[in-house]
Image (spheres, rainbow, N blue to C red):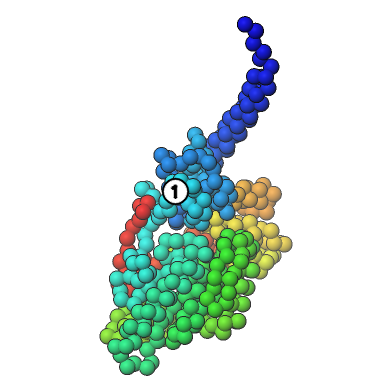
Amino acid sequence: MNLNLSPLLVYLLPMAAVWLFYLRRQKRIHDDALGSLSEAEQSGLTEPASLHPVIDPTLCLGCGTCVTSCPEGEILGLVHGKAMLVQPANCIGHGACKEACPQDAIRLVLGTERRGVEVPVANEEFETQVPGLFVAGEVTGMGLIRNAIAQGTLAMESAANFAAKAGTNTTEDDRLDAIIVGMGPAGLAASLKAQELGLKFKTLEQETVGGTIAHYPRGKVVMTNPVELPGYGTVRVRETSKEALLDLWCDAIEKTGLQVSTGQRVKSIDQDAGGLIVETTKGVYPTRAVVLAIGRRGSPRRLGVPGEDLDKVVYRLVDPEQYAGLRVLVVGGGDSALEAAVSISEQEGAEVTLCYRGDAFSRAKPANRARVEKASEKGALDVFLSTSPEKLEPKTVHLTTPMGVKEIPNDSVIVCIGGELPTQFLRNSGIGIEVRHGE
């Protein structure tokens, strides 16, 4: 019996070639994902900062739609044909992966088994256990500008309903309907919504307009999706700079005529017979409702060393260009410290020293570590690890290094060691705190 194999080979050979190409591609995808995961583990960047995905491997098809859907790049990867979070520290909670998954194999959670995330206890209306006291934005554990704007809008709608009901039980004329605390994305949205609803309200900000955004290093790209700002319109932005976003904030304030009272740090929020009393560094304000949009940064963490109260010491970088020709010390080992140090080192005549108490920049993103290494190799940046400031003087700083105390000339100090979470302030206001471990 003679068999003609030619027709069979015509079909089998292309199929084998396609299958071989597929296997090689899958291996490359697998190896790339494992490489990213290994790099994150070696750097100690294994804990997500806020909202992040958890994948059910029994439901995951390994189709990779979640990987390609993330606006931040390949935060997820395919390992052994299943989706996995391979760059946990770089995840900022877009949630696009969950929306893209055809199998509903992804859920979004806060915290992990090893690292809990403290968040205020609130119901679906964003109201805490304190009647009339609402929370929105980053303080709830949710990152992302789009999420904050949506929460600020919804929280204000709830606060307005509460104020309307409370107003029927009193004849007070001097009591505000609402106070918004904070002028970041959530605070702006809440304020614009209050104005749109015709409420009698006041917006308080302890620093400047922009809240959290104002603390980003100059030129840092902010990822966001189209969002609706009440009374202003749809903002269609996906990638932008800090400066452009702040310009948008100011444009929204100017066009809507929104009034913001800056330089007002809230000292306490107490209850009285008519609702709530907000005390700030500049006054006392009775109100029916409060929307807290204070973020999670709280007050800047201090060094606790002599000389820290000198005028040359600041806790955030506003504009690197102002440090041209100056001798600058940047303290910290996170992304904000590394980005600040590199940005200043690029200014003409600037002499920059970066010091960190740890023995490696394990909390920073690989890209920022690479930028610091490159700047150091070029001689544009002096790096001191296992080092911390001992004393600050008008024209010098004293650093405690592994080789002893080192005194270096200095004109300015930028401290980027994070902030104290406003947990105690929330508790003092009567708000319960819960720790999320993956819920």
Q: How many labels sit on residues? A: 1
Instruction: Note whether 63 is above or below 235 in the view shown.
Output: above
Q: For the point 35% across and 79% down, which residue is it?
A: 162
The answer to whether 426 appears left or right of 405 in the picture is: left
Residue 177, x across and y down, in percent: 39, 84
Q: For the point 52% across and 51% down, which residue is it?
A: 100
Q: Quadrant of the N terminus?
A: top right
Residue 425, x across and y down, in percent: 36, 70
Secondary structure of residue under mark 1: loop
Quickly name the residue at label 1: 104
Q: For the point 64% across and 11% down, which residue is it?
A: 3
Task: Spot the residue most to the top.
Answer: 1
| Residue 86 showing in the rendered view | yes
The answer to whether 117 appears left or right of 337 in the picture is: left
Task: Spot the residue most to the left.
Answer: 273
Residue 223, x across and y down, in percent: 58, 60
Q: For the point 40% across and 80% down, which residue is it?
A: 160
Which image quadrant is residue 323 in?
bottom right
Count neighbours of disc 1 (C-alpha within 10 A) and say few if under 14, some if 14 to 19, many if 20 or more.
some
Residue 431, x across and y down, in percent: 32, 69
Instruction: Note whether 259 is above or below 130 in the view shown.
Output: below
Q: Which of 434 and 393 is in front in this view?
A: 434
| Residue 42 showing in the rendered view | no
Q: Nearer the viewer, residue 313 or 222?
A: 222
Instruction: Note whether 439 is above or below 307 in the view shown.
Output: above
Residue type (three-letter) at the residue carrying disc 1: Asp
Instruction: Note whether 287 is above or below 34 in the view shown.
Output: below
Task: Spot the residue most to the front.
Answer: 1
The answer to whether 2 appears left or right of 421 in the picture is: right
